[in-house]
Image: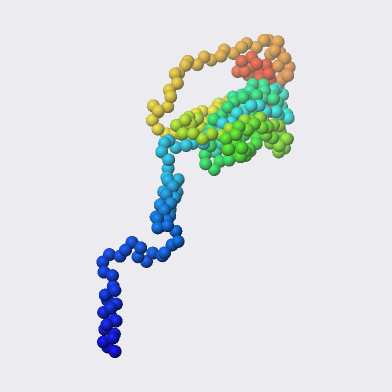
Amino acid sequence: MAATTNDTTEERRRRVLLGPLPAGFLRADSDGPPDSVDADYQAALALQQQLCGATMPTAGPPLTARLSVTIVQAKLVKNYGLTRMDPYVRLRVGHCIYETQTDPSGGKTPKWNKMIHCLLPPGVNSIYLEIFDECSFTMDELIAWTHIQIPAAVLNGETHEDWYPLNGKQGDGVEGMINLVLSYSVGPAAVATFPPVLVVPSTGMGYAAMPMYPAGNAQNYPQQPQQPQQQEQPQPITEEQLAQIYEMFPSIDKDVIKSVAEVNRGNKEATINSLLQMSE
């Protein structure tokens, strides 16, 4: 019995394969061709490289989103004050504020046709608009305002024009309408040369818009030649016009009325408007 066991053990030892293992050791047999496993490995490797390449940053300058807003005109339901209003628009996109020029005596139908290019920060999908009446001796009066969601068509690259309702003293959505043209583009940051605007109060003339640049070397910004400012000479007001204004405001000293007329450069309507505000 012991001899039979030793023979079996010796026979098994002779069957042991000595040396390096073959390439197909412990590999399950497949019905496909011999190179199918290598093809699957190459396909998986190519897919991994493609996915990794999609997450890698692309070469070139960073891209920046830019929103272009053309403020065309507005139709208001009421003119506040005895004289025609001088409206202008203030636009806020994110933390940046922009302004249009004032439409003198625009009244209830002001027109600006002002195109404003502004940077659109990530996560910002709406803009805020306010219409002010520019005043000479008091703070500018807020006439109307609105909050506008940027349409999805604009973010997809389309140019969108529409009339948007305005809120105000008359109620929400019934103060009037404003006409805007919106467009959106994405390009290199170097092309986006639209500095934000900082609104600061000025002396006696409401608010003025001033450009605000990030901190850095001042030589990087374009220098504009300084031109001598020519102050307009006030136009003399006629005695007949002064007499009419004296009759309208008998409680105000005549010297005060004459000084207000000179400040307004002989403009009769502006003088009357200023005196009305002083007498309130």
Q: What residue is at 70 percent from the left and 28 percent from the top? A: 75
The N terminus, quarter of image: bottom left
Of residues 103 and 122, the one nearer the viewer is 122
Report the side of 130 relative to 46 (left or right): right
Q: What residue is at 62 percent from the left and 30 percent from the top? A: 181
Quarter of the image for residue 145 reads top right
Of residues 36 and 277, the one nearer the viewer is 36
Quarter of the image for residue 36 reads bottom left
Q: Position of residue 157 (x, y in %)?
A: 57, 35
**Depicted 14 relative to depicted 133: above or below:** below
Can residue 141 be seen by looking at this rendering? no
Can residue 238 be seen by looking at this rendering? yes
Applied colour scheme: rainbow
**Depicted 41 relative to depicted 99: above or below:** below
Q: What residue is at 47 percent from the left and 37 percent from the top? A: 63
The C terminus, quarter of image: top right
Task: Give the residue at the far bottom of this rendering.
Answer: 1
Q: Position of residue 42 (x, y in %)?
A: 40, 52
Quarter of the image for residue 33 reads bottom left
**Depicted 7 relative to depicted 139: above or below:** below
Of residues 50 and 180, the one nearer the viewer is 50
Q: Position of residue 24 (x, y in %)?
A: 35, 63
Report the side of 48 relative to 102 (left or right): left
Of residues 44 and 266, the one nearer the viewer is 44
Total number of numbered discs in the rendering:
0
Q: What residue is at 52 percent from the left and 14 percent from the top? A: 230
